[in-house]
Amino acid sequence: MAFRGLQIKKDFYFSIGILSLIFLLYVIFLLIKPSVAINTNEEYTIFHWILSLSFLVIPIFFFVFSKDFKEGKGFEKFLWLSLSLFLCSIVHKPRLYIDAQFFFFVASLIYFYKSKRQIYKPSVFSLLFVVYFLWNLTAVFWSAEKSTSFQLINRLVPFISFPIFFLFFRLDDRLYVKMLKIFWQVSIIACLLSFLSIFYECSRMGISVIEFVSIQKKAINEIPVYNYIFSWSGTNHPSYNAIWIIASLVISFFLFKKKCIGLFSLLFTTVLFFILLTAMQSRIGIVMLVLVLFLGLLYINESKKWRYGILSSFLLLMIFIIYTKFSALCIYFFDPIRIDLYKISIDYIQQKMLLGSGVGGMNSVEISQVIGRSVNFPWDFYPHNQFLGDWIQSGVFCVIILLIAYVCIIFESIKKKNFLMFSFAFSMLLFMQIEMPFRFLGGSTMFVFFLLLFSIAPHNRES
């Protein structure tokens, strides 16, 4: 109880410090008297650079003043620092985490050379990730769009690079938990900076904050709301920002279970993420948050009575919401164009079921003209479903490889009672039903990295 009380005190100081910093930034931009939009379609402003610089500088203080960082050997510190920086870069912009990935690779090699020079046994699913990459690489040869194919293959490189990186190291449990806590803190900072962007734009355009927080899909001045919210960052797509938000929420429950954060921090994180996901109109993000919230409550309550109570309450609440708000939920969550895309994808799969069209085949002139126009799709066609997309491009064998890998992930997480791995994998399984995360470097990077990182988490042990 004494430890928990001390942790609550630390969480309180952390929250006060971050809120004070955000308030200071808010005062600065009021003095600047904003007149220029900071959305990604226009020129960056001073305020934009202040936000970005704040996001990059604040984590350094976490590293420098951390007691854990001062202990241990130099090569361990370097590995821990590179991993933490990579985690922090994920929530910013693609170029940043590409550079951070290089330092992570160098750090893992140095750790391997300086430590026991031990190659750690890879998990079955990490080997299947490599097979998945190699099969897609093979599918380039029967693709009609070779230039597009190699661009897409580059986005799948994390499926082979990260499994190799993770062969060379294992983190001390204490440093592992500390690293996750740093990512959790940075995620909160990123969310607060996003809210600060909202306040900035409200002040500039003279509108109410309520305009940004709505369950209805909308745009302001023909610009999507999420472009304003993440204007300080290099990534504005709501679905892909939802991935790191959900990963951080999973981590927050893990940290609470390990007694590294208090109840106030857990509640603050949950509410903050829910408001942000609602504001950025990420429907799948809200669904994943509800799932993680349910799994997290089961995870932190070891009493069977509590678990049965949570399960019953959750089911009753879902039934009540669906029964009373069914029509509103259908309008908000279901996208008619995706249903058309699924039907068209299935029709095309039946024509080339075995090997598919080859990687990049979805972007060929033939498919873009015939399929794309049939749904008035203004950009390159893709089915917004990872499994259908893989089947179209790389055939049924690619889908089988991915499904087997997922079965191994779920089985291993249940066997090891790994909450981090199970919750994130299940959330991403939902995500893959409405998006193709592997079509973008950010999606494949977060998917592979978080699963591998969570797979080496300390289980059933105190920090």
Image: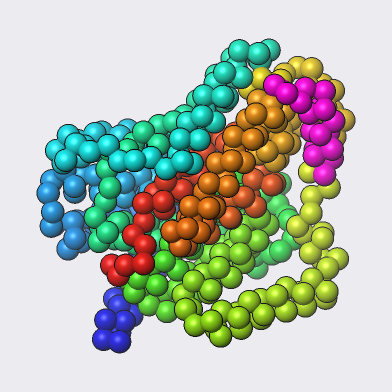
Q: Is residue 355 left or right of residue 126?
A: right
> 398 or 49: which is nearer to us?
398
Q: Can residue 50 be found in the magenta stretch?
A: no
Q: Is residue 180 left or right of residue 383?
A: left
Q: Quadrant of the C terminus?
A: bottom left
Q: Residue at x 30, y 70 (%)?
A: 462
Q: Residue at x 65, y 68 (%)?
A: 210
The answer to whether residue 243 is above or below residue 94 is below
Rendered location of residue 61, percent (x, y): 24, 57
Q: Residue at x 52, y 38 (%)?
A: 444
Q: Is residue 245 at least partly visible in the picture?
A: no
Rendered location of residue 46, percent (x, y): 41, 47
Image quadrant where residue 204 sits = bottom right
> 3 or 407: which is nearer to us?
407
The answer to whether residue 204 is above or below residue 17 is above
> 88 or 215: which is nearer to us?
88
Q: Is residue 326 at least partly visible in the picture?
A: yes
The answer to whether residue 52 is above or below residue 374 is below
Q: How many marks?
A: 0
Rendered location of residue 402, percent (x, y): 59, 38
Residue numbers of the magenta segment: 339-356
Q: Can residue 346 be found in the magenta stretch?
A: yes
Q: Main secondary structure of the magenta part?
A: helix
Q: How is the image coloured?
A: rainbow
Q: Quadrant of the N terminus?
A: bottom left
Image quadrant where residue 190 sits = bottom left
Rendered location of residue 127, percent (x, y): 45, 35
